[in-house]
Image (cartoon, rainbow, N blue to C red):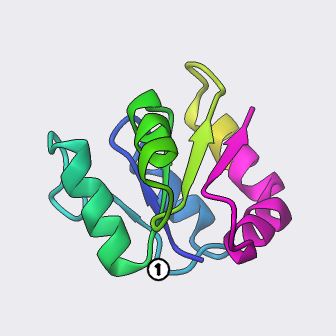
Amino acid sequence: MKLLLDENLSDQIVHRIIDLYPDSEHVKTLALTNTDDGLIWEYAKANGFVIVSKDADFHQRSLLYGHPPKFIYLRIGNSPTLKIVQVLRDSFDTIIQFGDRELESILVLA
């Protein structure tokens, strides 16, 4: 499973999770920062990414349009990068199962 991390998350996270989530990217490396959420959504959809964000706008978009792409909503407040890395690593099995489920479009991690 490849994750697309939104700009509200550090681009340093990708380097710390790439062993579990190969081919994951940050919007910064794809020149998608300061871009409309709709463009990020369409990029993720066209390229098989699961969006990871703390942005409630993606949550609303996922409720409205469903998937693809799937969306992982991090409800962890202003946590340091290491905490976010730990959440993504600790939730690996849950995230993989979420990716395999046809009917689910949103996974909330708190």
Most distant residue in the front direction? 64
**Residue ID at (74%, 72%):** 101
Most distant residue in the top direction? 78
Is residue 31 found left or right of 65 in the rendered image? left
Looking at the image, residue 98 lies above or below residue 35: below
State the count of labels: 1
The residue type indicated by label 1 comes to Asp
Looking at the image, residue 49 lies above or below residue 64: below
**Residue ID at (31%, 57%):** 41
Q: In which quadrant will I find the N terminus?
A: bottom right
* In the foreground, 1 or 99: 99
Q: Is residue 34 visible?
A: yes
Looking at the image, residue 27 lies above or below residue 46: above
Which class describes the residues within 10 Å of circle 1: few (<14), some (14-19), or many (20+)? few
**Residue ID at (43%, 78%):** 48
Magenta residues, start to end: 86-110
Q: Is residue 27 visible?
A: no
